[in-house]
Image (cartoon, rainbow, N blue to C red):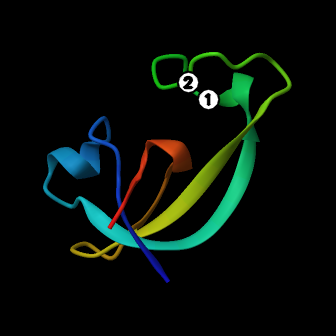
Amino acid sequence: MTKLEIPAYTDRWMMGDREGVLVNTSSLPWEKIQESIRPRGGKPGDKVEIGHVKLSISGKTVRVILNDCTAR
C-alpha cells in the first residue's frame, strides 16, 4: 500500500483532495495522453506508466501519470 500525492495539474488537487493510495498501475501509449500533460522527451510508441490512485477524502479513484506523483 503506497501513499501518493497526486499532481497539482488535476482538478481533484485544486479541490483539496490531494493524497491517496495507489491501487493499480497500467501503461498507456505516449501519443494517447493529452498534449498539455504529455511527458517531455517521449515519442510515439513509448509507454507511460499510469497510476490508479484512490483518494483519501472523496474515495474516488483517479488515473494520473505515475512519474508526476509524489510519494508520501
Where residue 46 is drawn, which disc sits there?
none
- Measured Cα–Cα span from mark 2 to mark 1: 6 Å
The picture places residue 37, in percent across and down from the top left corner, at 47, 25
Residue at image location 46% in from the left, 65% down from the top: 53
In the rendered structure, the answer to whether residue 51 lies left or right of residue 48 reads left
**Identity, as a three-letter code, of the amino acid under mark 1:** Ile
Number of numbered markers: 2
Q: In this picture, is 70 found above or below 71?
A: above
Q: Are marks 2 and 1 in contact (CB under 8 Å)?
A: yes
The picture places residue 1, in percent across and down from the top left corner, at 50, 83
Callout 1: helix, strand or loop? loop
Callout 2: helix, strand or loop? loop
In the rendered structure, the answer to whether residue 17 lies left or right of residue 38 reads left
Residue at image location 26% in from the left, 43% down from the top: 11
In the image as oriented, which residue stretches furthest toward the bottom?
1
Number of the front mark, 2 or 1: 2
Label 2 Cα crowd, 10 Å radius (few <14 / some 14-19 / many 20+): some
| Residue to which mark 1 is pinned | 33
Q: In this picture, is 54 found above or below 27?
A: below
| Residue to which mark 2 is pinned | 38
